[in-house]
Image: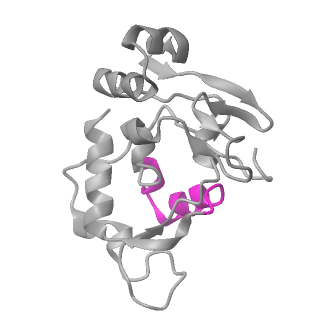
Amino acid sequence: MKDGVEVIVFPLAYAEGMSSSSDRSSRWYAKPDPTQQTATGETGLRFSCTVCGNCCSGGPGYVRFSPEEGRAMAANLGISEQSFLDDYTHSTSLGLSLNEKSADDGYDCVFLDRETMPGKAICGVYEARPSQCRTWPFWPENLRSPESWERASRGCPGMNTGKLHSVEVVQMTVERALADR
């Protein structure tokens, strides 16, 4: 729970429920004003990161990554791949996952830094962060329906604000998320 809202972090069903081959025109976010928060008739979804860290914290979860992403994070940290694996990851039934650390409201990703910039939460491996992190909030389970998007937005102040992401960009991000699973 964070501010009375359950924040779902890196769920197991990350890529469940959406097919990359589905008809793009049938997506609810392709309809004019999909969130019904503007009167502009725009299509697509708005999102701008507020650096709150909510997407990197909450209940226990998984932050899965590919071997290439693991090597990139190790290089970003200036350590060997083996040191990265030993110090920052653990095995799960689904493969390797980044470690979590205990936090006030549950758990934070091991790379989430809440101290360097007071009032902000920054990623210690931002430039090399895994696809799972890069594709937030355009995860398949957040895009199943307007209600799913609204539910996720209760824990993410950057959703429904800021930059408008076109239907094509949203769909390409979903396809990337699915391909990386």
Instruction: Give the percent coordinates (x, y) of residue 99.
Output: 57, 21
Residue name at image x 60 percent, y 54 percent:
51
Instruction: Give the percent coordinates (x, y) of residue 27.
Output: 32, 66
Residue name at image x 33 percent, y 43 percent:
177
How many labels were placed on the picture?
A: 0
Instruction: Give the percent coordinates (x, y) of residue 121.
Output: 64, 46
Most extreme residue toward the bottom is 39
In the picture, the quarter occupied by the C terminus is top left
Instruction: Give the percent coordinates (x, y) of residue 148.
Output: 52, 57
Quarter of the view holding residue 166:
bottom left
Vertical relation: 68 (above or below) 124: above
Most extreme residue toward the front is 78
41, 16: nearer the viewer: 41
Residue 121 located left or right of residue 69: right
Say if residue 15 shows up in the picture. no
In the picture, the quarter occupied by the N terminus is top right
Does the magenta run of residues contain 146?
yes
Quarter of the view holding residue 72:
top left
Does the magenta run of residues contain 80?
no
Residue 174 located left or right of residue 95: left
Residue 3 located left or right of residue 71: right
Residue name at image x 46 percent, y 50 percent:
136
Q: Which residues are magenta?
A: 141-157
